[in-house]
Image: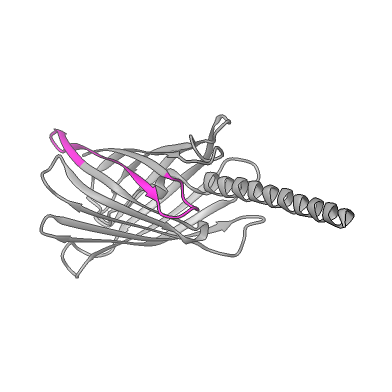
Amino acid sequence: MSTIDNSGIKHADAVRRRGRRHLVLAGALCGLAVASVVRADDFFVYSPYVVQGQSELELLGHGFQDSRPAVSGEYAYQFSAAHAFTSWWKPEIYFGVYQHAPGGPQTLVAREFENLFQLTAPGEYWADLGFLASYEYKTQPGDTSVLEFGPLMEKRSGRFVQRLNLIWEKPIGAGASRGYAFRSAYSLSYQWYRGFAPGIEVYARPHDNAYQLGPVFYGERLSGAGSELEYSTGVVFGLNPGAPDMTFVLRLEYEFF
């Protein structure tokens, strides 16, 4: 009887050890997935409007706080310049997309060429419509470049403003997968006054099983004739284990003619 009991105990211990290893591996893979996929523009809800002749300088950034050491402390940011050459087309160049993973150095991971097209005049239909198309060139060896595209929508009702983005991503180049990754972003804000508009933002990345929601406030400040500074900041909370516990976001945009 004692031999049977000892072998049973040993077997149970082995199962528990394998289970712990599997949990650790799953957690690490989850952390790596979050760290490798999410970019600063994933936490940005685009407007579909183009103002002819307007130029802009932009900085987007985010940082994670999470119970997983492989995720907590990661941050990313990117800066860009854009100019609206027509009343319907605004190209934008992201000179640098930088990322810092916990325990690692800050790294230039990509450069991007983005195009925003305004498809309808404001108020022409129930919602105003635009389209986003971009090419992101990965700078790190082994990373696959990406095409992004999808519709941008905005609806204004009195002081309430709603925006919805539906974006598909397609890896391209040697070794790229044939599948598409989808993400969506939604915002609702109340234009209390010009310098302050409280709201919420919702992000969904089904491909990564990550869903987030949280409060954000927006504002703009005139800084001279024909120029203004727009800003927004907030925190979105993970709604499921696949998303970081908290993501802090900051965006600055200087527009001028």
Asked where in the image residue 234 lies, by quadrant, the reply is top left
Give the residue at the far bottom of this rendering.
125
Quadrant (top left, top right, bottom left, bottom right) of the C terminus: top left
Say if the magenta span includes residue 186.
no
Q: Is residue 245 above or below residue 73?
A: below
> Magenta part of the protein: which range?
219-245
Q: Is residue 245 above or below residue 209?
A: above
Residue located at (25% from left, 53% from top) = 50
Report the number of numbered marks.
Answer: 0
Q: Residue, x 16% and y 41% (percent of image)? A: 196
User: Relative to 2, is 174 on the left or the right?
Assistant: left
* 198 or 111: nearer the viewer: 198
Vertical order, 81 against 44 (above or below): above
When asked about the image quadrant of residue 252, the answer is: top left
In the picture, measured across the screen, residue 138 lies left or right of residue 159, that is right
Q: Is 167 situated above or below 82?
A: below
